[in-house]
Amino acid sequence: MPVEEKGGDKETKKQKQGVMKSRQISLCICSSCIEPKNCKSLEQMTRIAYQIAKAACTFNVNEIIVLQKPHGENNELEKMETNKKIDLNGAKQTQQRKMDSDTMLLAGLLQFFVTPPYLVESVFGNSPIDLKKFNYAKKLPTIPMLPFMQANDGHGTKKYKEGMTIQNLSKSRKKTASGKVKKIKKADRMTKYVNVGLKKMLELKEAVPKGARVTVDMKKHIVVSPYVAYGTSSTNNSYGYQVRVATSLEALLGQTPFPDGYDMILYSCCGEYFATTKSTDWNDALSALSINGKNDMTKLVGNILLIVSPGNDWNAIFNESKLDGEAKDLFDGSIPIPTKSRVEDGCMISLSKLDA
């Protein structure tokens, strides 16, 4: 009967929402997806990043990690010294190795697609990325699933807006008698001013840390959690996903935002355009780890790391690491997808299987 079917749908929806609340998905992609062999222009690189960003927002990915593919001695890619602090989303990080330009660009593009236009200069102001690299990205449609594009109080103005906290307007860094800038005191690291894209900076009722991405209640002038602002109908945090860069496998697993690390690591093999004996053996090994049919993937809970990468790239990354065993030993399971799929398509297919 129609009534029973409707009730069943409601029950399924409630169960699915409960799983989504208890599950955090991190998506790891290799920087090789925008290498010259895969992309011939900046426009192609931008469109690949855009597809990955859309897939991540569609399926509520909390974190995207760009894993740098190791290069040989004859690497022609431009290198960036990583003793420079990289600031992509308000949190500064220092990497131990050199980061190539492809890795930095891919991470920057992914962050750009979840950044409100009025915050681009604030977010990327201290980044070594040339803002001209985003010229093609600016022409692409805004991702509609982003909560800061949806939230509206019904009167044509947004009740909640994303902002970047800035230094108090009345304060400036003082200098010592010798001309050196004085160290910042703990109290000076707080501010009441937020850039929310208006002509004037918004003043909050209470001070918050400087240089932080926040969600602001525009009527009450307070910082609220993304859950309060956007609920569970959209993405799990205020700006779609966090972007993290890992220059090694150790950095991927050791610098997670979760104190206890990842509860499960899944793998989807893609980008295998030319079948070889090695790739066939690799796919056979993964088929034994397939969780398709063994478990209901929609019921998987915890902090899940999904790695979408060509097998050859993953083997190269693992062989460069100091971990024992074989590359496949790191995975708790695999999500089978067409191995000749491009990485950006593989992200959409594998995430849809987790969500289906």
Image: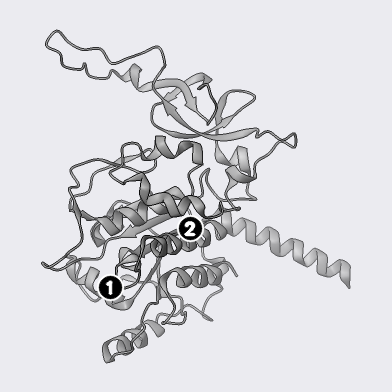
Q: Residue 279, percent across and down?
A: 31, 86
How busy is the neighbourhood of tag 2: few (under 14 within 10 Å), some, or many (20 plus)? many
Between 60 and 194, the one lying in front of the other is 194
Write down the quadrant of residue 270 in the picture.
bottom left
Between 338 and 113, the one lying in front of the other is 113
- CB within 8 Å, label 2 to label 1: no
Residue 284 appears left or right of 4 = left
Q: Is the residue 333 above or below the residue 176 in the image? A: below
Residue at the bottom extreme of this rendering: 277
Q: Residue 188, percent across and down?
A: 34, 18
Q: Coloring scheme of the render?
A: one colour
Q: Is the residue 218 above or below the residue 278 in the image? A: above
Mark 1, secondary structure of its residue: helix
Residue at the top extreme of this rendering: 177
Answer whether residue 92 is visible to the viewer in this image.
yes
Q: Residue at x 38, y 31 (%)?
A: 211
- The three-letter code of the residue at mark 1 reads Asp
- The three-letter code of the residue at mark 2 reads Ala
Looking at the image, tell me whether mark 2 or mark 1 is earlier in sequence order.
Answer: 2
Between 136 and 124, the one lying in front of the other is 136
The residue indicated by pointer 2 is 53
Between 130 and 154, the one lying in front of the other is 130
**Spatial separation of the CA atoms under disc 2 and disc 1:** 21 Å
Residue 237 appears left or right of 68 = right
Assign the C terminus to one quadrant of the image. bottom right
The residue indicated by pointer 1 is 313
Answer whether residue 253 is visible to the viewer in this image.
no
Residue 352 appears left or right of 9 = left
Q: Residue 217, percent across and down?
A: 60, 29
